[in-house]
Image: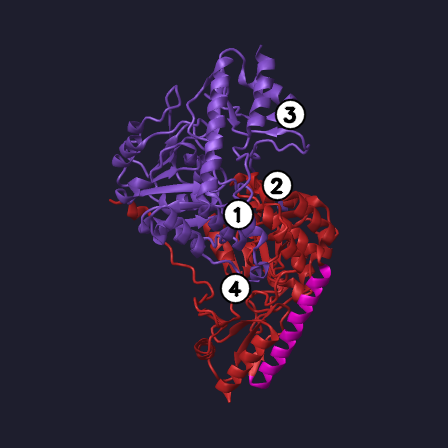
Chain colours: A red, B purple
């Protein structure tokens, strides 16, 4: 027997490619093509580095306060963590302890299943329909919790308040997590429903609409009882706090609403333009409420287009998975990047 | 039944106090009293914030390369993460899958037991002797792994290479983790043993000797097989990468060796001074290889001294735990802070 026999055995996770070369167009990780607010850059470049000798505010008090004010909530309604992945995994740990299966769509953020397996949470994946719509009436059976990404990923399809109400009304005895990673790009937020549903928890990220993928910042909103449980989950595993620079960055980002709105408007404009142009060359493009589109071509296989674009140094995302393997997920870049993509597509298709 | 019935149930973790008031002396979290290197401050204040729109280098490639060169290792020997807690929890996940109990001292870093419970790893706590020494021959029975903090916390006691060799020679079939969070303050590093023992993994933090508690940076060193398993553990749970600012900060810190050595020398000098002065007023102070001391008074109970110091706005750490509840853990502050502590102690004792 060797020590090597007891090493973890897993298949490596395959993330979107990050080629080493410089001149390529990266539309495969749903990053924002525009930099973070100038206020964020000022916050970093004026940061008092000497304070780093001390541990950060354990519960990111200043950031939580800023987020609460921004959303019209109280600090006890908000938990801040190191990106949505951190926040979601703590939520799973905090809420899904009934032993009953939790429910989420079969096509959604792929780490739901990972966390369930790590935390031994049983789960059921509910089939979305052929247009990738989630039927809220499917979420009616007994369960240990519900997780809905709204807008959903990688499909880009969003649901409205009525849709969310059906799910919430059917699930008063378990926590319903609504992951709003992409909501700022035209989705409908569940925040107004927080007043009515104590068991609703909303998660958000700074990575997409706030151009801060490099920083790792996310948060959850919910009733004080729900948010307390997230803190308890964090404390139970000594999960580390948001670092001091990230806390300052988050506050600066939230305070620059004008830049935020302008950036989002640009992304949405480019998305609408790309959608239209791709439809003109034979793509079915789902109606997107996110900073990416999900599209299939009427004749050319997605994999072939994916490989072709890669050969042209344009990286989009293709998932080799049942039901979606003829689709491409394309992040909205700058107009220049999107025009380069469209030229390449036209060259291939015509 | 309510959704609240399924919330996580745990006792809240009690960290060292962080009073809200301003003027107090904080010697309870083993933070460094000196700021990080001026090079670190430059790295932050000159950081190109626009790059934050992209995700960080997933495996912190630049930081890993810098750390490897610094320690005379190769990049495949190094894993960088978000502080020692992150790195250690991934190591536990990566290495301790045998089903056999892992072994660590009964008095050591308190989160070993937390991770074992979260990850369902059985464990045995091996009694340290009455002087808080770890007897390496106690780590000889069949086990699933060994974790030794060297120097140990909260005792401050360090072991030498012979001590480590005994443990490693007795444990060739499981991974031996040596947590060197405090080693820079005069401990003996196990790095030279990496050449001989493929199953040795060393963890380090930037929080203490590099004055970067506010940043959350740590790393592990080991054989390529061991380090690959840590990457696999990280990938398996989508553990988020070190953020882009933290990567730049880590590199800048490592490159300023002169400042690092000077800061450590100051802390060690103050520690030696404090040790001597406390012994003069009736304390038994363990021989420390760390940036804190562990001390008990010959007549006054630790709790009484702890409360008294708190009333004087001086915060040290007292653990209400068997075997160590008559000891105080005191972090080395600036000379000024330590003199204030000594004055207060003298006032109480004489």
Q: On what subunit does the disc labeled 2 rest?
A: A
Measure the alpha-carbon separation of dots 2 and 4.
Answer: 38 Å
Seen at 54% across and 13% down, the residue is: B300
- The answer to whether one can see residue A188 in this image is yes
* Of the pair B57 and A44, the residue shown nearer to us: A44
Measure the alpha-carbon separation of dots 2 and 3.
Answer: 19 Å
* Of the pair B227 and A102, the residue shown nearer to us: B227
- Label 1 vs label 4, nearer the camera: 1
Measure the alpha-carbon separation of dots 2 and 1.
Answer: 20 Å
Q: Position of residue B136 (x, y in %)?
A: 31, 29
- Residue placed furthest toward the bottom: A350
Q: Position of residue B259 (x, y in %)?
A: 48, 41
Q: Which residues, given as a range, are shown in magenta? A: A257-282
Measure the alpha-carbon separation of dots 4 and 3.
Answer: 56 Å
**Element carrying mark 4:** loop
Seen at 48% across and 44% down, the residue is: B83
Q: On what subunit does the disc labeled 3 rest?
A: B
Q: Position of residue A179 (x, y in %)?
A: 61, 58
Q: Which residue matches tag 2?
A: A57
Q: Which residue matches tag 1?
A: B40
The N terminus of chain A sits in image quarter: top left
**Element carrying mark 3:** loop
Seen at 64% across and 67% down, the residue is: A158
């Amino acid at each position: 027997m060797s020590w090597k026999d007891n090493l973890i055995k897993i298949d490596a996770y395959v993330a979107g490619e990050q080629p080493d070369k410089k001149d390529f167009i990266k539309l495969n990780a749903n990053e924002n093509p525009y930099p973070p607010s100038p206020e964020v850059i000022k916050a970093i470049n004026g940061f008092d580095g000497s304070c780093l000798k001390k541990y950060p505010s354990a519960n990111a008090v200043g950031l939580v306060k800023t987020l609460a004010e921004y959303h019209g909530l109280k600090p006890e309604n908000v938990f801040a963590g190191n990106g949505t992945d951190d926040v979601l995994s703590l939520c799973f740990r905090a809420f899904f302890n009934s032993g009953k299966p939790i429910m989420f769509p079969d096509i959604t953020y792929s780490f739901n299943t990972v966390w369930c397996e790590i935390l031994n949470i049983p789960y059921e994946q509910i089939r979305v329909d052929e247009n990738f719509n989630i039927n809220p009436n499917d979420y009616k059976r007994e369960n240990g919790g519900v997780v809905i990404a709204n807008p959903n990923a990688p499909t880009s399809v969003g649901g409205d308040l009525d849709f969310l109400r059906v799910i919430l009304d059917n699930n008063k005895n378990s926590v319903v997590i609504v992951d709003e990673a992409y909501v700022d790009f035209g989705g409908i937020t569940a925040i107004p429903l927080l007043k009515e549903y104590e068991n609703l928890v909303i998660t958000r990220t700074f990575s997409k609409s706030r151009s801060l993928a490099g920083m790792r910042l996310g948060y959850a909103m919910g009733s004080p009882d729900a948010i307390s449980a997230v803190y308890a989950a964090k404390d139970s595993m000594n999960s580390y706090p948001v670092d001091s620079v990230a806390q300052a960055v988050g506050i600066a980002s939230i305070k620059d609403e004008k830049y935020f709105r302008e950036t989002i408007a640009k992304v949405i404009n480019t998305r609408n333009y790309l959608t239209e142009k791709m439809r003109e060359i034979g793509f079915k493009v789902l109606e997107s409420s996110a900073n990416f589109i999900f599209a299939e071509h009427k004749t050319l296989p997605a994999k072939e287009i994916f490989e072709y674009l890669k050969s042209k140094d344009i990286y989009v995302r293709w998932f080799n998975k049942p039901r979606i393997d003829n689709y491409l997920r394309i992040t909205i870049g700058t107009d220049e990047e999107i025009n380069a993509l469209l030229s390449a597509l036209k060259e291939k298709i015509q």
